[in-house]
Image (tube, grey):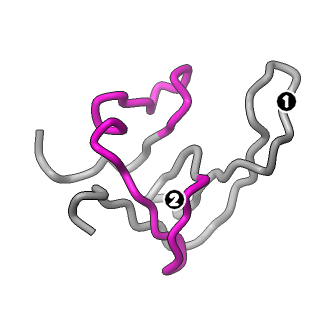
Amino acid sequence: MSDTLPDRLSTNPNSPYYDEELLAKGVGIRFNGAEKTNVDEYCVSEGWVRVIAGSAKDRFGNPMTIKLKGKVEPYLQGDA
């Protein structure tokens, strides 16, 4: 596998953008220049991240998320 990260990645196993092998390597996110540790999903080309909003859950028991727009920079944590 190359060192390039996908345009879109999710930590939710039910998502079509979930990649367990890549997530096991450790993916970090810089959003508008700041480190984010609570990112649930990101999309570089569209410029957004979904972050987990506290401990709130939806009716299916999944964490509630908020979509934020800005500059997204994913990286492998070993490369930082």
- Can residue 35 be found in the magenta stretch? yes
Instruction: Choose top left, top right, bottom left or bottom right for residue 24.
Output: top left
Q: Residue at x 44, y 42 (%)?
A: 9
Binning the other alpha carbons within 10 Å of mark 1 as few (below 14), some (14 to 19) or many (20 upward) gives few
Quick one: quadrant of the N terminus?
Answer: top left
Q: Residue at x 68, y 63 (%)?
A: 68
> Residue 75 at what x, y percent from top left?
31, 60
**47 shown above or below 62:** below
**73 shown above or below 11:** below
Mark 2 vs 1: CB contact within 8 A: no
The kind of secondary structure element at disc 1 is: loop
> Residue 6 at what x, y percent from top left?
32, 46
How many tags in the picture?
Answer: 2
The residue sitting at the bottom extreme is 33
Instruction: Choose top left, top right, bottom left or bottom right for residue 28.
Output: bottom left
Q: Residue at x 21, y 64 (%)?
A: 79
Residue 45 is left or right of residue 67, and the answer is left
2 or 1: mark nearer the eye: 1
- Of the residues shown, which amino acid type is indicated by label 2? Glu
> Residue 61 at what x, y percent from top left?
79, 22
- Of the residues shown, which amino acid type is indicated by label 1? Asp
Tell me the magenta residue range: 10-38
Quick one: quadrant of the C terminus?
Answer: bottom left
> Residue 17 at what x, y percent from top left?
44, 32
Q: Residue at x 28, y 56 (%)?
A: 76
Binning the other alpha carbons within 10 Å of mark 2 as few (below 14), some (14 to 19) or many (20 upward) gives few
Residue 11 is left or right of residue 7, and the answer is right
Mark 2 lies on residue:
46
The kind of secondary structure element at disc 2 is: loop
The residue sitting at the left extreme is 2
Mark 1 lies on residue:
58
